[in-house]
Amino acid sequence: MTRRTADVRPRGRRRAMRVLLVDDRDRLLLFRDSDPGMAPVPHWWITPGGGVEPGEQDVEAAVREVFEETGTRVAPADLVGPLATRVVVHGYSDVVTTQDEAFWFVRVPAFEVSTVGHTELELLTMTAHRWWTREELATTTEEIWPRALLMLWSLAEDATEDVSAGGTTTPLDFGTVEESTVPV
């Protein structure tokens, strides 16, 4: 009989905003994230975004996170969404975090990313950034979080057309998923 060891990693929960940032060349910005507590160090690609601070509205958090992580400013009115929501469990080598996430979309002129606003942890774990085309995302063998990113991008395009025509968006519920380097 196999005996299971108790998972002693600290656990936390937070609300987080993720942003699909697409430039005028139809490329989506992703950051290469990592879990430096493992050997070899695993990597995956994520959208800009992060936690909602106390007293902050979701759209305000999305705008702030875009600026902090990319150096570019967007206005709250530029964001389309939320497009989708989900609960995601991230199990890393040192912690388990459950996030209640909402995804937003914004189209921006092409720009050079600045990481000056990154936290110490982001500077340690987010090792690169890259603008991706749809074709590159569809054919990559690299790990992309969320896994439904291409579907979200298509949803964003449809929602943008609806909003331009005077409509509103109703977020798609992606349910609960796990994206982990060390499963929970």
Image: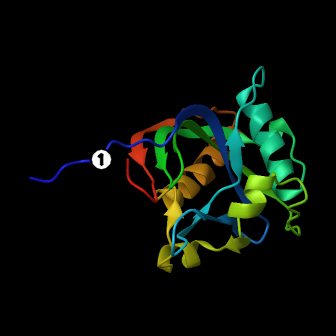
Residue at image location 47% in from the left, 79% down from the top: 141
Q: Position of residue 69 (x, y in %)?
A: 80, 54
The foreground one among 26 and 142 is 142
Q: In the drawing, does residue 106 fall left or right of residue 152? A: right
The extreme left residue here reads 1
- In-front residue for pair 84/41: 41
Task: Find numbered disc 1 in the image and state the secondary structure of the residue it sits on.
Answer: loop
Query: For the point 55% across and 57% down, which residue is it?
Result: 154
From the viewer's perspective, tell me whether residue 66 is left or right of residue 15: right
Q: Is residue 58 left or right of residue 84?
A: right
Residue on which disc 1 sits? 5
Q: Amino acid at mark 1?
A: Thr
Q: Is residue 127 above or below residue 180?
A: below
Q: Is residue 130 above or below residue 49?
A: below
Seen in the picture, residue 27 relative to 86 is either above or below; the reply is: below
Residue 33 image position (x, y, % from top left)? 63, 63
